Amino acid sequence: NMAVFKPENVQDFYEIGEVLGSGHFGQVRRVQERTSGTCWAAKFVKLRKSVGCLMGLDRSSVEREVEILQVAKHPNIVNLKDVFQSRAEVVLILELMSGGELFDFIAEKENLTESEAIAFLKQILEGLRFIHSKNIAHFDLKPENIMLSDKASPHPNIKLIDFGLARHFCEGEAYRSTSGTPQYIAPEVINYEPLGTAADMWSIGVITYILLSGMSPFQGETDEETLSNVIALKYDFDERYFPMTSSLAKDFIQRLLLKNPSERMTAEECLLDPWIKPITRQQLAKRNRSSINMRSFKKFNARRKWKMSYNIVRICNRLVKMKVLCKISSEGDSLERHCESDTEDRESQPASLLRRRLSSTS
Ligand code: ATP
């Protein structure tokens, strides 16, 4: 059990390598342990300098993420090996997920049967069943946070990452939050109602819907529209996007996309659902004959990747704007116009609340 944050310098123990990804408060880099030569992923989290400071994360938030990862030891949850701390940052040494994101892995395939998709989904559900049994909710389930240990293996091992929004509940404690990503967020989050592990199950419903059809069930033109679709439970199974989908799969999704959190299937119940765990031979056969809408899925994934880079441009625009405001120069202004439009993002609207952590870089 790793109880303490080490005060030593990370670089004394690990050689720092290339950037693997970036989060809102710093980068994730590949590192190599000097003694063993083993590779790990190091998540560098910048700490907030003072209470009024906009940049950086509170130490208590990092401590919470660490505490949760320590409890969440499971084959389908990213493993935390070590933690280093200095005055300015905390470094989490995590197991390296060298296989990339599950959605990217699937998008490279020619086709995928429902049975194959279920083999992936099952691992996600096993991880969730475990953390939920420990009274931990992830609260940020989305394709970017579902990764593969190693994609070369014939049966890739899937793990959930990014416990930055996760919460460990105490008995009888009511927790509310407006953090998350509009496409995957449960209605009770938007309505600022008490939250529990059922909010994760909603996200599983959305992720499964996308996996099978390549369409996002509640996606609107804007975040506001998406959120109102979620609250109104406005979604359907358009035959054009579900041409090869089994009815068991649709039933499964329908039992997750329910407004009332207590009516949704739990992770445990999902694992016993006839779509995931067929009872009859016919059910099994149907599953093998059904397949996911690969053409549409590839399109969804390409658009998703494009939007991720678009978000980076938007953050850059804001930084330029901030500089312009500071310098009162017109130079930065013309620079900004060369980048993508920033108009979609209006601070006064509810969706900006949901774009957690991003606001601290704005
Ligand atoms: P966000 O602000 O987007 O929620 P974050 O600051 O909480 O991000 P993570 O989501 O944990 O940070 O990591 C950011 C990115 O770094 C991930 O999307 C992923 O691409 C990469 N990454 C994180 N952990 C690992 C890992 N263990 N192995 C490989 N890559 C990783």
Image: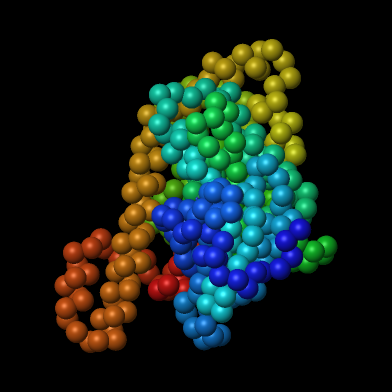
Q: Which residue is at the front of the view, 5 or 288?
A: 5
In the image, residue 43 sits, relative to residue 86, either above or below, namely above
Q: Quadrant of the C terminus?
A: bottom left
Q: Position of residue 49 (x, y in %)?
A: 52, 83
- Please tell me in which quadrant of the rendered image residue 264 appears: top right
> Residue 240: where, in percent of width, then height?
41, 28
Q: Eyeballing the image, is 158 above or below 340?
A: above
The answer to whether any part of residue 142 appears in the image is no
Count numbered badges in the picture: 0
- What colour scheme has been applied to the protein in the rendered image? rainbow
Residue at x-position 54% and y-position 16%: 289
- Where residue 102 appears, x then y in whole percent? 50, 39
Q: Indicate whether 266 appears above or below 71.
A: above
For image coordinates 19% across by 84% down, the residue present is 329
The residue sitting at 38% across, 34% down in the picture is 298
Quick check: can you spot residue 96?
A: yes
Is residue 133 toward the left or the right of residue 324 in the image?
A: right
Specify the farthest residue to the front. 35
Displayed quadrant of residue 224: bottom left
- Depth check, front residue: 228 or 173: 173
The N terminus, quarter of image: bottom right
The image position of residue 43, as x and y in percent, is 53, 60
